[in-house]
Amino acid sequence: MTARLSLYRKAEQELYKLDRSVKAQFYDFCHNFRNNPGLPGLRKKKLKGDSRIYSARVSQDYRALLTRTGADTDGTESWLVIAVRHRRDVYEELQVAVNRVTGEIEFVDLAVVGDSALRRAGITLTPSEPEPEEHAPKPAPAPAPEPAAPPLLAVYKADQLRDLGVAEQLIELALTVTTSAELDQLVEGAPLLSKDVLYGLAAGMDIEEVRREITAPVELDQRPDPDDFATALARTKVTTVDDAVRAVIEEGDFRAWKVFLHPTQERIVHRHYNGPARVSGGPGTGKTIVALHRVKHLAQQLPPGHNKPILLTTFTKNLTTDLRLRLASLVEPDLLARVDIAHIDQLAARVLGENTAPGRGKQRVYDHVALNEMRQLLAELDDRRFEPEFLLEEWEQVVLGQSVPTRSDYFKARRAGRGRALTRPERNHIWKLIEQFTARLDKLGVETWGQAAERAARFEIERAAKIKARREYKDEIGGKDLIHRDDSSGMRYLGYRYRHIVVDEAQDLRPAHWKMLRAMADPDLPNDMFIAGDAHQRIYDHQVALGALGINIRGRASRLTLSYRTTKEILAEALRVVDPKDTKAKVTYDNLDDGIDTLAGYRSVLHGPKPDFVPYDTWDDELAGLAITLNSWREELSTDETGAPRDPSGRIAVCVADRDMVSQTMYYLATKAGITCAELTKDGPKGDGEVHVGTMHRFKGLEYQRLAIVGASDGIIPRTNVIDRYRTEDPPRYEREQRKARSLLFVASTRARDALTVSWHGKPSPYLPV
Ligand SMILES: Nc1ncnc2c1ncn2[C@@H]1O[C@H](COP(=O)(O)OP(=O)(O)OP(=O)(O)O)[C@@H](O)[C@H]1O
């Protein structure tokens, strides 16, 4: 009799941490077990508490815990290894069960739950192989009775937790925990769904929210049969134990990078969507991971070919590089070759290149160049009726944003969110100025990236219209090919550029980008667009309502709430930046459509030190303080957990408000503190200096082990000298500027994984929670 063995994913993760020798013994064990699961040397025996779990001998000290999941007609048995652990940590009460919500096999480990919680719930664990008396650890003296604190989840009933999918064995325990430290301990060995639900409730989500955001996305249509382990196994993420896995494990931590998606993430990745879908969620909740896994999932479904029917795009060049690296570690080269990875401006430039005769292209310039031109134009005309910034924005957001072609269209254009109303004569005057301004840019042979995006969108929309017309014509003539029709224009070969488009950092794309993307994929096919973004992290002024741009995400929007990057301590402070307690300052954020998004239930499973908030008198003092902090971080990160030397380069970063401060900081650190720096540019870090330094904008989408935000002073965040005049002149703009500055600080502070220091000189920024 032989056996097929699978490995529960938590067991796989645990396995990486074991000594090399134990790993090798485990694979010998697997080999023997697969050849003959009844081999006496395996010393297989049932645990007393749950008749479904067996313990078997891997080595003198280690045991494999297994459950039988079925047998083929030829007698081959299927077994699932649910854990590999030291015999001391095997106890009789271990249980496996089929989760009533997800239908997956799950395993609850009570060994990691704190004694106090177990005692309160009246649970005693019986060691499966008691140590002989003389070796047994002396029982700890009974602690003094604790003062009765109210349970954290006192308002909930067992049935409610059960319905939400919390594992049966954890329910009573969860209702007795009194501190968040106890809850952390409880969920450490818990199945992922239980962990998500309990953290959600503890973070203040109500039952309905948890049901909607966490349980419903992973719920089966029908209650699963609790005894049908074979079917449950098919739903459970496992690794089949074969010889390839042996090689991988023996190579060491080769797969330590592997991220096991949480149930909510998993469901979002693998769902079939009948149209564009969107995933939102606070920083570090895994939106990018989900987007990358989505690309992998879509690539796996493609028919064979050599083209690139999937587009993966994001806002900036350095993020594109990062996406490419991460995707390459996730998919095989042949699948990677089916994905076009390009940032959004690069795509627009490509479209324009295709549609422009050689030598006729324009140079693309950033907005500050355009603003200068606008200033000069107004100076030459001696026209002071409108501020140059106002005119440039009016042009960007109203004229370009809505593709307003003529003056009479501009008279009718919607100007929602633009602040002060304009009379007809004023609109007339502005239109004239904008005409002069665009003629001026034209003459210089330049265009802004905004203009380029608009033109690219127009070309793509025309292209899509041709594809549609061609299809309609084909339908009319009964599906025949269009051999004779408009062959000259290449229409015969025209098709949508992509089958699937996946967008990351979606909150910052311009309306024109969305129009272009929409026209690049067939709107009649499912799974056409997958959009990941968070409006709380919008740091450019490009607000959009996807629905109005032909991208309808209704019914296909999901939210992630658990942060895997930032510690609870950092998150708590960062949240106060965008969600201030002071209700006067209450700020709202959109959901990339016409609704509102919140960070309700946003939480972390990680713990670390509280962030430091440090005041200084002067900028020089602040830089000197920064050097001390960086030196001690550098020292601490120069060895790993085992004490072996490690290169701390690229693990530490300094974030400042503007380019001048970047130069000053780098100069100070290099000349006065002997710390080498690499500036974070559009293309990523420049050079191989050990500490990365950049403006807040450059930190979007990145993460660092330790981060210092310096110069977070009043007047700098936000730049009061720039935005103060809008306070009375243009209050909506003032609001928008404030919101952007808040989001910048929020993005910056959520880049830190383990440690965050925020400092300022003079008065602190009003957005800091100090
Ligand atoms: N299921 C998971 N298990 C372990 N780690 C995870 C998981 N999902 C995400 N992470 C880790 O959390 C971190 C943040 O993930 P990711 O960059 O995808 O988040 P994000 O939501 O895109 O963040 P941001 O909005 O700040 O850019 C990464 O280090 C990632 O590897």
Image: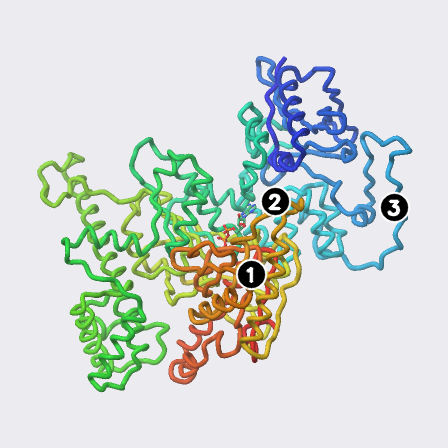
Q: Residues within 10 Å of mark 3 (few under 14, many from 20)?
A: few
Residue 162 visible in this rendered orientation of the protein: no
User: Which residue in the structure is indicated by mark 1?
Assistant: 707
Residue 420 visible in this rendered orientation of the protein: yes
Percent across and percent down for residue 116 are: 81, 50
At x 65% / y 15%, what residue is drawn?
Answer: 36
Closer to the N terminus: mark 1 or mark 3? 3
Q: Residues within 10 Å of mark 1 (few under 14, many from 20)?
A: many
Q: Decide if residue 80 is on the left or right side of residue 686.
A: right
Q: Decide if residue 78 is on the left or right side of residue 515.
A: right
Q: Decide if residue 178 is on the left or right side of residue 743.
A: right
The mark closer to the camera, 1 or 3, is 1
Q: Could you tell me the amino acid type at mark 3?
A: Ala
Q: Quadrant of the C terminus?
A: bottom right
At x 32% / y 61%, what residue is drawn?
Answer: 511
* Mark 2 vs 3: CB contact within 8 A: no
User: Which residue in the structure is indicated by mark 3?
Assistant: 140
